[in-house]
């Protein structure tokens, strides 16, 4: 089972295909389930550890932006650049990854 | 145009109520080639033109019945793979390239559907006759910018009425999903009551709101939807309860595509954080819960609905079934009358007068 949605990756470049005979028919009862419908790639190590650290921060009671950033830094979670999080960089990173 | 005939109102209902918008696909499923689907028992070809606009026709070539979805995407029309007949988005045959002049050219031969793409989903109007579709109105969770949502889709091998019953049944959360991350709380006993709204009704556990899957709402606003909310654990971040707006679209008598929009009232960095966590962690957990529903439903006893012993928790189910049955009886008559009116029209649109 794939851990991302390959079709999601393709659908943005939706130009009519010049070819026929591409069988895109969904036959009732012949189901391919997609678990991860909303990501177009496997999560990176960085993304996984950021998710993990965020859950740990929330578990520890962090609620406000400053509490979350403080908790991430205490947990040793760094940006991909190796920098510690600031409120600004955290917001920017979430805007990038949480589109 | 092909006609589907139903023997009675129950058979009609088993294929799904019409005069409604039904979601049929996620936006990302329609890329550059036509897609062939079955919804409400109709075979439909769906494709995107150069501008990204989505079109839908009956998936049946007027020539010899090949599926148009196997053919060429020519933007505002599709061409059949078998002998090249070109059918425009409005159902009119634009060209029959294999013969010099063909009476089929220019004729309205193929049923076309009204389509709209909203909230990452493609909705089709399944009208009984040719009248204009109703307006498609979403519940607040999808209509308002204060909310953020993801669409989760799954095909289940059950009639859609079982999928609807499942959502109309708030009591199952405490049992079926007891080991899940969000639905373990709440009393295992409750009194249930029913309250009418402007667009449908709410069915709820008395005195337990905000604890677990405590209530569910049925609404009909151009489409038939179900809505509920479930408390989220604090460790999954800010934003409060998790809301679901669901649609169950019949594929055929035995298969259903469920569309569950998963929504939270979040803005700013809280919104972004939820969306990040959803993509990288939460979607997997939610999928596991949904699988519990699918497993129970797909393995229900054969014809389970015909041999039930319903009790007080099932009042929401019985109420909705009664509404559906009445709607089906009403629609079945209209559908038959409309199909009959079409019987005497031949393929090039001329009226045949059998009496002459
Ligand atoms: S069946 Fe489509 S062109 Fe002949
Ligand atoms: Fe459930």
Image: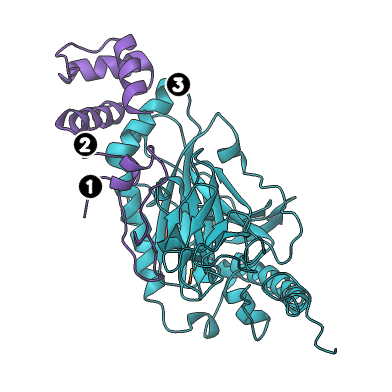
Chain colours: A purple, B cyan
Task: Point out the tag, 2 or 1, that comes first from the N-terminus.
Answer: 1
The quarter of the image holding the N terminus of chain A is bottom left
The residue to which callout 1 is attached is: A3
Q: Residue furthest bottom?
A: B355
Please, what secondary structure does the residue beneath circle 3 have? helix
Please, what secondary structure does the residue beneath circle 2 have? loop
Residue B188 appears anywhere in the view: no
Which numbered disc covers residue A43? 2
**Can you give x and y, in whole percent of width and height, for residue B190 in the image?**
53, 60
The crowding category of the residue bearing disc 1, from other C-alpha atoms within 10 Å (few below 14, some 14 to 19, many at least 20), is some
Instruction: Tell me, yes or no, whether the two marked residues, 2 and 1, touch with CB atoms within 8 Å.
Output: yes
Please, what secondary structure does the residue beneath circle 1 have? loop
Examine the rendered structure and indicate whether residue B319 appears above or below residue B276.
below
The residue to which callout 3 is attached is: B268
Residue drawn at (39%, 64%) of the image: A26
Q: CA distance from mark 1 to mark 3?
A: 27 Å
The crowding category of the residue bearing disc 3, from other C-alpha atoms within 10 Å (few below 14, some 14 to 19, many at least 20), is few
Is disc 2 on the same chain as disc 3?
A: no
Q: CA distance from mark 3 to mark 2?
A: 23 Å
Residue B149 vs residue B239, the one in the foreground: B149
Examine the rendered structure and indicate whether residue B249 appears above or below residue A57.
below
């Amino acid at each position: 089972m794939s851990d991302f949605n390959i079709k999601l990756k393709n659908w943005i470049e939706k130009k009519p295909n010049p070819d026929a005979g591409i069988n895109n028919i969904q036959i009732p009862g012949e189901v391919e389930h997609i678990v991860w419908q909303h990501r177009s790639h496997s999560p990176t190590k960085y993304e996984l550890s950021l998710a993990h650290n965020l859950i740990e921060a929330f578990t520890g009671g962090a609620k406000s932006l400053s509490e979350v950033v403080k908790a991430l830094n205490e947990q040793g979670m760094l940006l991909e650049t190796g920098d510690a999080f600031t409120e600004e960089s955290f917001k920017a990173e979430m805007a990038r990854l949480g589109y | 145009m092909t006609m589907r005939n139903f023997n009675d109102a129950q058979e009609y209902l088993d294929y799904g109520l019409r005069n409604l918008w039904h979601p049929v696909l996620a936006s990302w499923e329609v890329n550059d080639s036509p897609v062939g689907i079955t919804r409400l028992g109709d075979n439909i070809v769906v494709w995107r033109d150069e501008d990204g606009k989505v079109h839908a026709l009956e998936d049946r070539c007027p020539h010899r019945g090949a599926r148009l979805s196997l053919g060429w995407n020519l933007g505002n029309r599709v061409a059949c793979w078998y002998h090249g007949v070109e059918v425009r988005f409005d159902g009119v045959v634009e060209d029959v390239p294999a013969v010099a002049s063909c009476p089929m050219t220019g004729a309205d031969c193929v049923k076309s559907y009204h389509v709209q793409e909203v909230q990452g989903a493609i909705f089709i109007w399944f009208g009984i006759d040719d009248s204009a579709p109703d307006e498609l109105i979403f519940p607040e969770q999808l209509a308002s910018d204060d909310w953020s949502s993801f669409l989760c889709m799954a095909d289940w091998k059950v009639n859609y009425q079982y999928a609807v019953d499942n959502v109309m049944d708030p009591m199952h959360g405490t049992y079926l999903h007891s080991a899940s991350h969000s639905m373990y709380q709440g009393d295992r006993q409750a009194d249930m009551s029913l309250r009418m709204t402007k667009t449908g009704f709410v069915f709820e556990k008395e005195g337990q709101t905000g604890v677990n899957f405590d209530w569910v709402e049925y609404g009909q606003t151009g489409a038939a939807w179900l809505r509920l909310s479930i408390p989220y654990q604090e460790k999954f971040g800010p934003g409060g309860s998790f809301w679901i707006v669901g649609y169950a679209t019949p594929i055929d008598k035995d298969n259903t595509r469920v569309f569950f929009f998963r929504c939270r009232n979040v803005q700013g960095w809280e919104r972004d954080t939820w969306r990040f966590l959803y993509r990288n962690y939460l979607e997997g957990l939610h999928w596991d819960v949904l699988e519990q529903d699918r497993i129970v439903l797909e393995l229900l006893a054969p014809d389970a609905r015909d041999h039930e012993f319903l009790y007080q928790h099932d009042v929401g189910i019985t109420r909705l079934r009664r509404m559906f049955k009445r709607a089906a009886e009403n629609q079945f008559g209209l559908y038959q009358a409309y199909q009959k009116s079409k019987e005497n029209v031949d393929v090039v649109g001329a009226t045949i007068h059998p009496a002459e």
